[in-house]
């Protein structure tokens, strides 16, 4: 269990630093294209590990139903959810986007009540209220901004909220697909290629060929290393965390990402963090803890 907790916190750190890295390069690299690029690189990385560790036989034995469920989870959570999140983050900044992204367990709980018959507890009700209050504080204000900029930021915020809802659906499907007992490596060998293909389709639908400008010889080594770190390695850490501590505890540990990312956004990206953002992030994290 201690090892699982360590992996969960490591996963939160990877997600926080990945968000900051993508925000930092958003002016040079299209975020939707990088979402596809990192899935392609991570797929190659995962299949190389699969070959090294000899899990091909296990991959061939995964039931078709699990493959379809995990594939759907990838399309909804990665191709659609991550693309929306990264785009929205460029509009509102990592300091706001990270706390909002950490509220996806709220949507998971909302789904679990009618679909899985989970009880509505007083703690969950209070937690939901705190999350909603926290998110309201993170909403861009008209003060110190033009109406056009505020409108763009609010659209970006809606994109991040929509991403959190899609991640909730994806997590629910992911839990079902993991129920057949395959290893984290095999699970990612199913999810990542589907995510790569669907992300490429989304990128071309959204931006066309121009989305791939910026992938030159000088930048490719750094982009490949970032993709291996955030997705190749990060997906294995996250999937192993879910396998060891369960989806609920893994989601709870992942709420540490805003606590890591918000201070780093000030140091690394020089973003302005107001008292509203600090209070909003704090209430959102506490609310998610109560829900879980």
Image (cartoon, rainbow, N blue to C red):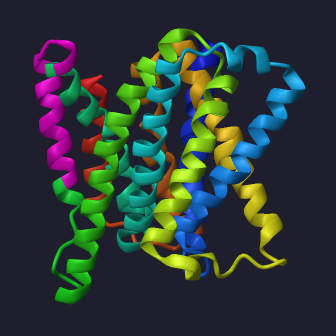
In the picture provided, is 1 more to the left or to the right than 103?
right
Q: Is residue 252 visible?
A: no
Q: Quadrant of the C terminus?
A: top left
- Identify the magenta region: 115-135
Q: Is residue 137 visible?
A: yes
Whether residue 85 appears in magenta in the rendering, the answer is no
Residue found at x 47% / y 15%: 246
Q: Where does the image place residue 167, in percent across and percent down from the top left?
A: 37, 41
Residue found at x 51% / y 18%: 178
| 25 relative to 242, above or below | below
Q: Nearer the viewer, residue 75 or 82?
A: 75
Residue found at x 62% / y 27%: 7
In the picture provided, is 268 more to the left or to the right than 271?
right
Q: Nearer the viewer, residue 283 or 292?
A: 292
In the picture provided, is 103 more to the left or to the right than 216?
left
| 147 relative to 164, above or below | below
Q: Main secondary structure of the magenta part?
A: helix
Residue found at x 43% / y 21%: 175
Q: Where does the image place residue 189, in percent across and percent down from the top left?
A: 67, 32
């Amino acid at each position: 269990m201690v090892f699982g907790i360590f992996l969960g916190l490591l996963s939160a750190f990877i997600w926080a630093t990945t968000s900051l890295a993508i925000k930092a390069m958003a002016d040079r690299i299209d975020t939707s294209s990088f979402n596809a690029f990192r899935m392609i690189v991570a797929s190659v990385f995962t299949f190389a590990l699969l070959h090294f560790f000899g899990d091909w036989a296990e991959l061939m034995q995964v039931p078709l139903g699990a493959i379809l469920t995990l594939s759907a989870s990838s399309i909804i959570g990665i191709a659609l959810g991550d693309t929306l999140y990264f785009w929205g983050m460029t509009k509102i900044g990592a300091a706001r986007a990270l706390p909002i992204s950490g509220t996806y367990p709220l949507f998971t709980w909302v789904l679990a009540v009618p679909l899985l018959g989970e009880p509505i507890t007083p703690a969950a009700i209070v937690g939901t209220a705190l999350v909603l209050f926290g998110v309201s504080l993170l909403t861009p204000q008209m003060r110190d901004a033009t109406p056009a900029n505020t409108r763009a930021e609010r659209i970006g915020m809606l994109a991040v909220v929509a991403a959190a809802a899609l991640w909730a659906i994806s997590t629910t499907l992911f839990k079902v697909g993991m129920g057949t007992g395959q290893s984290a490596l095999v699970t990612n060998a199913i999810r990542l290629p589907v995510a790569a293909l669907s992300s490429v389709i989304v990128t071309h639908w959204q931006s066309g060929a121009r989305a791939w400008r910026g992938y030159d010889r000088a930048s490719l080594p750094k982009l490949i290393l970032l993709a291996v770190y955030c997705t190749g390695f990060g997906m294995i850490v996250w999937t192993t965390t879910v396998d060891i501590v369960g989806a609920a505890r893994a989601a709870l540990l992942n709420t540490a990402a805003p606590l890591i990312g918000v201070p780093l956004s000030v140091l690394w990206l020089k973003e302005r963090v107001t008292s509203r953002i600090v209070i909003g992030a704090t209430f959102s994290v506490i609310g998610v803890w109560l829900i879980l």
